[in-house]
Image: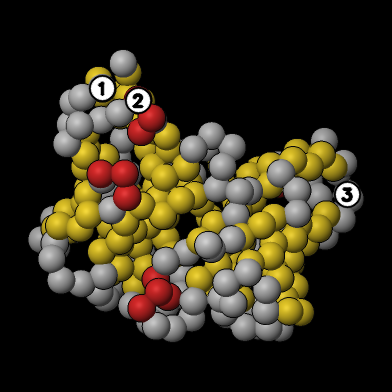
Amino acid sequence: DVKVTQSSRYLVKRTGEKVFLECVQDMDHENMFWYRQDPGLGLRLIYFSYDVKMKEKGDIPEGYSVSREKKERFSLILESASTNQTSMYLCASSLLGGVGQETQYFGPGTRLLVL
Amino acid sequence: AQSVAQPEDQVNVAEGNPLTVKCTYSVSGNPYLFWYVQYPNRGLQFLLKYITGDNLVKGSYGFEAEFNKSQTSFHLKKPSALVSDSALYFCAVRVYNFNKFYFGSGTKLNVKP
């Protein structure tokens, strides 16, 4: 069964802290994605990666960075957390090619509160 | 620019009645269209997708969606709503040969007993 896991379900951090959100998938997917979800705005893509050590900016990359050192793991880093980064963060993965490439599989999400 | 619109923030329907959740899209190129559902404090779950072929696609939990190219729409439907269908529904589009997905803002479906 397809599985995407995220390191924390809830996280509380202070302004200025460096925050690490981790995502692991066990499906050998090439693509991995980080989104943030805010009411009324839907999902907005922060970064995605289509291979180890490869990354591309999404629509709202400012204030974030990512790391993909292993195929199964994709980390989102908030270099210096700010209150406007309080949000739900969702990780997803998908195949790069083939029939199944179209479908993304999502983790349960991390709800981050920055005080 | 690619975009997806879900014109209704909320849809209310009585249990047993048919439901429709609307989605329109704007893309350059052939679209791949998806519906996802999100239950409270959970990630998104895949419901169904349109890639090519028959315009009516069937998915999980009795949901179906109709691709209408002329109206650039992909509305989600179910003949008889259940209270357990109450959730947040997202429409998404991907353009062929690109890895990025574009999501709508979501529609909250409330099914009342």
For residue B83, the mark is 2
> Which sits in the foreground, A60 or A4?
A4
Q: CA distance from mark 1 to mark 2?
A: 6 Å
Query: Residue most toward the left?
Result: B70
Depth check, mark 3 against mark 1: the one in front is 1
**Left or right: B107 with respect to A96?**
left
Point out the tag, 1 or 2, that comes first from the N-terminus: 1
> Which sits in the foreground, B58 or A86?
B58
> Mark 1 sits on what residue?
B15
Q: Residue at x 68, y 47 (%)?
A: A110
Q: Residue type at mark 2?
A: Val
> Mark 3 sits on what residue?
A16
Secondary structure at numbered mark 3: loop
Q: Residue at x 42, y 60 (%)?
A: B102
Q: Residue type at mark 3?
A: Gly
Q: Chain of mark 2?
A: B
Q: Horizontal and vertical percent for residue B100?
A: 46, 70
Q: Horizontal and vertical percent for residue A23?
A: 69, 62
